[in-house]
Amino acid sequence: MIALLQRVAEAWVRIEDQPVATINRGLLVLVGVEAGDGPEEARRLAERTCQYRVFPDADGHMNLDVQAAGGAILAIPQFTLAADTRKGNRPGFSTAAPPDEAEPLFQEFVSAIRARMGRVETGRFGADMAVGLVNQGPVTFWLQVRPGGGGTVR
């Protein structure tokens, strides 16, 4: 399972020109589900997302996680993160989990964040979304939890 974390001053998602979710300071998290992922990977990725220290402390060092920084999370399902791009000029999606498997795992990821933080804004699974953000830094990190990998994150 993959999460692309972006530290933001603000982020939002719209569907059919209608606002769906907005956050101020926090993390915009694009989430991709790969074939073979399960609930354990979703929960571990959520834990790492909440605990990943990407916000500056009083000395300007990235020592604060999103909660310590008083930030919010906007999670967006994005199956293209699981694309196979190793060859050719067109991505392949055989490495992505099918929608009927991916959606419950995205929801498990969101539920695990809610259990830690109380609130997380989300996009809508399977929708054509317009996502906007003001990336601070810019600061962007790729986290990946692999099935059977003991919850390791790259």
Image (cartoon, grey):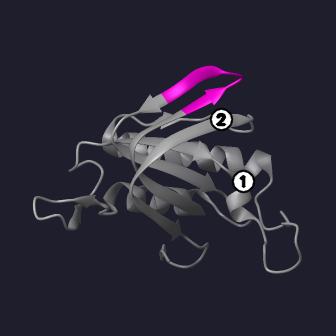
Give above or below for 48 relative to 17: below
Residue 149, located in which quarter of the rendered image? bottom right
Kindly report which numbered mark, 1 or 2, lies closer to the viewer in this rendering: 2
Residue 113, percent from left and from top: 41, 46
Q: Residue at x 57, y 52 (%)?
A: 30
Which quadrant of the rendered structure holds the N terminus?
bottom right
Q: Residue at x 83, y 63 (%)?
A: 93
> Which of the pair 2/150 is nearer the observer?
2
> Which residue in the protein does label 2 denote?
130
Residue 146, percent from left and from top: 59, 73
> Which of the pair 89/4 is nearer the observer?
89
Q: With 124 as the anchor, is 11 left or right in this view?
A: left
Q: What segment carries the magenta color?
A: 13-21
> Which of the pair 24/102 is nearer the observer?
24
Q: Say whether marks 1 and 2 touch (CB < 8 Å).
A: no
Residue type at tag 1: Phe
Is any part of residue 118 visible from this angle?
A: yes
Q: Earlier in the sequence, mark 1 or mark 2?
A: 1
Residue type at tag 2: Ala
> Which residue in the protein does label 1 denote?
79
Q: With 54 as the anchor, is 127 left or right in this view?
A: right
